[in-house]
Every structure is written in C-alpha cells, then in structure tokens.
Amino acid sequence: MENSTYKVYEDEIQLLEEEIKLLAEKYDDVKQESTFYSNEEILTSIKLFQREFQGESKGQECPSDLKAQLESLEREISFLMKFTGIQFTSHSKKTLEKNENRTVQKHRLSGNCRSLPFQLEFQLLETRDKENVSAVITDLSIVMESGEYSDLSKFVSSTEEHGNLLLFFRSLSSYAEWYEHRRCTFLHFKAKYPDIVALPEGQLGDYIILRNPKLSGFELMIVWKIHIDEEGRTTPVLDLLTKVPEQVLEQKMGPIENAPTCFRSMLLLFGIETTIENLIKVTGLEK
Amino acid sequence: MEERKAYSRDGVLAHLEMLEAQAHELALKQEEKEQQEEKLAGLKARVQELRARRDELRAKLELQQKRLLEKGGAETHPEQPSARAVLEWKIKSVKALLQLFYLTGISGKLTKRGVCFCISTAYEGTYLESYYLDVLTKPEVQIQRHSVPIFIPLEQIAKKYLQTDIRRFLSVLSDHLNAYAARRYQADQLQERFSDRLEGTLQRNSLCNLLVFHYNVPSDGRSFLFTARLLYADPCCSLPTEAIISCTPDAPAALAEVAAAHSDAFRRAALHKAFDSFSKAEETQDEALISPPGSP
C-alpha cells in the first residue's frame, strides 16, 4: 500500500517537473522571439561587458567567454554564408507550439542568394522521437522580385505548392550562379568590343545585340535564357536571332537561315564564350 | 533439583531471547515506519514546492503575454537590459540562424583542420536523412570521414571535383543523395500507404533505382495482378526512365491499355502519387458504372 501512495506523489512530481521545464522554456522563447537588438546595441554591449569585468578579472573566465562565444558563432555563420552564397539578412521566429516531442515554429527569413534577393515565410514542424528529429515544412510562401526573374516564377509557385524549401535553395543557388555567369560574360564582351556589342537591357538583361558599326541594318541578337524546370534543374538556353536588311536576305537566304542551327552546333562544340566571341569577330569583319 | 534449575534457566533465557527479538523487530518496524513517514512528508513537500514554482511560472507567462499584447507584439526593453543579457540574446539569435542553415541543403561546422559539411536531403516539405563529410583542408583537400552510403559514387565525384571546385563537388553529391533519398521515400510511401494494393513484398536494390513489385488492378469486378519493373537509369533523377508493366496471361486484352497508361504515369509522377491517381481513376470508373452519365 505504501508503494502505491509513493507512486501517486512521484508521478505528480514528474509531471510537475516536465510542466515547469516547458513553462520556463516557453517564457525564454517568448522573451527571445519578441526582443530585438540592433547591431549598434550589440556592439555597445560588447564594449560595456568588457569594461564591466575589467576590474574583476582576477582569473575569471567569464568576461571574454561570452564575447568569444559570439565571435566564434559569427565566424561560423559568416563562413557558411560566404561558402554557399546564401546570405540571410533578417530572421524572426515565433514558437507556436512546444511540448516534449513536437515543436512548431513560424519563421520569416529574408536574404539573398548571390545577387538574387528572396523573402520566405514558413512553418517548421519538428518531431522528436528516441533518436531522430524529423522536420517538415508547411505553409511555405516565397517572394522574389518578379519581372526580372520571370524564368523563375513558374518554378517558385510549384515549389511553394509542395513546400519544397530545400529544392528552392538548391535550385536558386544554381540559377544564381548562371545568372552571375551570364552577367559577367555580357559585361566582359561589352568591355572588350564596345563598338560591336550592345546591352539594350543592361547587364542584367537576357540578350545582347551585335552589330557592325559600318553595316547598318544588320544585327545579331543572342538570347541567353536560364531555364529552370519544376524539378529545379537549371539549363542555359541560347538562341541566335538575325536581323537582316531585305536586299541581303534575297541574296543570302541560305547562310542566314542556317545561322541559328550553326549557332547551336557551335555552342555544343565550343561552349558559350567561344561561340559568342566568334560571332562578335564575324560581325566585326569588313564585308 | 539441578535439572529443574537448568530447565528453567534455559526457559528464561529463551524467553529473554524471544523478548529481545521482539523488541528488536518492533524497533525495526518503528524505524521503517518513521522512514516511510519521512519519505512521504518529503514527497509532499516536494510536490508543494513544485506546484508553487509552476504557479509562479504560469503567472510570469501570463504577465508576459499581457505586456506583449499591450505593446503590440514586441518587447521594447521595459527595464534597461544588461550588457550580458543583450549578448546572450545575440548568441541565441545567431545559434538559431545557424540551426536553420540545414534547411538550405548544405551546412557545416568549422573544425580544427577543416570543415565538417552536412548535406541535407528532403522530399518536398519533409526533410530526410542528413549526410556528413569531414573534410580536411591541409595539406590538401581530402575527406577524412563521411557517412555517405557505399552505393553512392563518392570517390568518382570527389576525383572529378573535390580538388578544383569543392562547391561543385558538394552540389553534385547533393544531387545524387537527394535523388536517392527521394526514390527511397517514394518506395517507402508506396509500401506504407498502398500495402492493400501490393501483393508480396516490394523488391528494391540499395540504391533504390530498380524496383519490382506486384499490384492489383480492379476491372469489371475482378482483380488482376500487374507486375511493375521500374528502372531509374539517371542516378540524379527521382523518376524512372523505364517502367515496364505486365499483366498476367489470363488478363483481358483491354487491360493492355491500362498497363500502358500506368507505365506512362509512373514515368511522369512520383510513385505514390501515380498510385493516388490510379485510385482516383478507378473510383470514377466505379462511379460511372454505378450511375452512368446521363442517368438520373
């Protein structure tokens, strides 16, 4: 009989201890999530903190400990952001639900992937069992400045629909790399052949125009689109469009009709840069 | 006379011994009782203490919620925060952001001699297993340890990219791992959610790029057994390149069309989603049979 009386109390003690733990965590979470200190406030605090302990630093490890911890964490995150090209510029989260095996948090995350900015909102459900923590994303909402990245919009809506956050990041990285590469290539050729190459939509556009300053009416347009399918695979798609005055067209129909096909073959054989350079050189030739 | 004395001496001794034993037992029982009461009192006190703490915390939380509502959701430092508190806040904040990094697919931790990378895999919104690579950067870039399964061509990929472009290396490896994780997830989902349609076990290889299974297809009130053989020739793809569906010899010719449709479905959609579409198609077929269009 004694044992069962003990058990009643012991069970209650266990329940209370768990409840206290969760309540304390909740209080800390709410405090953490509803506070915000700017970078200046943080820098000021670091200085204050050091000064506070300057007088008492008799073999205490306290003072530099927090500062060192913060510096080490910032080094880690700085490395990751630099390495992956994914920079987070702001983050806020709110814990909606938390008990021993389940946590639901709502996150708001903005940043950029190389030069492409994004804004995300999602709910993260983490379930804990004996050894694993499993994570599921729901309610994903992605905002990317539209217009400039029209290739992306279909991909983005499909990713949103399936909550495919990981695929979004992986594909965005790949797309951003191609985007950068295209921009650099266009700039490079514009700088190298300023008379022949024109960038009507600037370096962020998706085409360049080649014209010989001495031959008017004759233009080559190289369109370089970056195609991203629903599975996130990125492929560059280049095409050649020709603009030729009518008289020339009547005479030289053949080679002009074949130009796009030749262009594609050249791409396969020589790659993008060499092909474009060859075309530029051809355009610049005196007829 | 002496005998009687001896007897009574023994008797007295025995009696004394008995009394001693009884007293001892009583003392023990008394001690036990006291211990139990002490323990019980201790437990009761602990319960009181914990209840008080719990109530205190509840009140603290309520107050916190009230203040937040008043301030419109953001605490604006009612008390001047100590420098320590600000730093601790920042540390927690950076830790939280670091923890989120795995959601992007590639994260890692700096180590003494290099970096320990973590490649995450996911299927749609569900994150699956993560794989680790302990990479040393000196004297040259090399993988010291890893948790990549043996059927993923890690060495080949490393040979091609590790020295020249480590980002590309991780990205290609991530493609392989994610495709594998997605194939495995689909096969698991099929087994879990459509076990009633499957006959026998689903056979798969470790890379999950060859699947063979048998499933039931209802037609005209009967059930026919189909065999599916799915081959995923592209290791970075989670859809099969080949889907051979065959029926049993006694199946009616009309089912060949169904088999072709299924083959198509398997090649275009994820395994479990293809099955979802079959179930839906069959339901509408049943409904059409029960109440054909045009009837009241």
Image (cartoon, grey):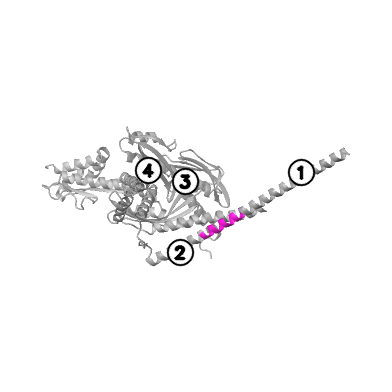
Please check whether the numbered discs 2 and 1 fall on a single chain.
Answer: yes
Q: Chain of mark 4?
A: B
**Residue B17 disc label:** 1
Please give left or right for residue B215 compared with residue B179 in the image.
right
Residue A208 place in picture, x, y as percent:
20, 49
Q: Nearer the viewer, mark 4 or mark 1?
A: 1
Q: Nearer the viewer, mark 4 or mark 3?
A: 4
**Spatial CA span between label 1 and label 3:** 77 Å
Q: Are marks 2 and 1 in contact (CB under 8 Å)?
A: no
Q: Chain of mark 3?
A: B
Tell me if residue B210 is in the magenta stretch: no
Mark 2, residue position: B62
Secondary structure category for the residue under label 2: helix
Mark 4, residue position: B108
Q: Earlier in the sequence, mark 1 or mark 3?
A: 1
* Residue A140 seen in the figure: no
Against B279, residue B234 (above or below) is above
**Spatial CA span between label 2 and label 1:** 67 Å
Against A269, residue A152 (above or below) is below
Amino acid at dot 3 = Tyr
Please tell me in which quadrant of the rendered image residue A191 appears.
top left
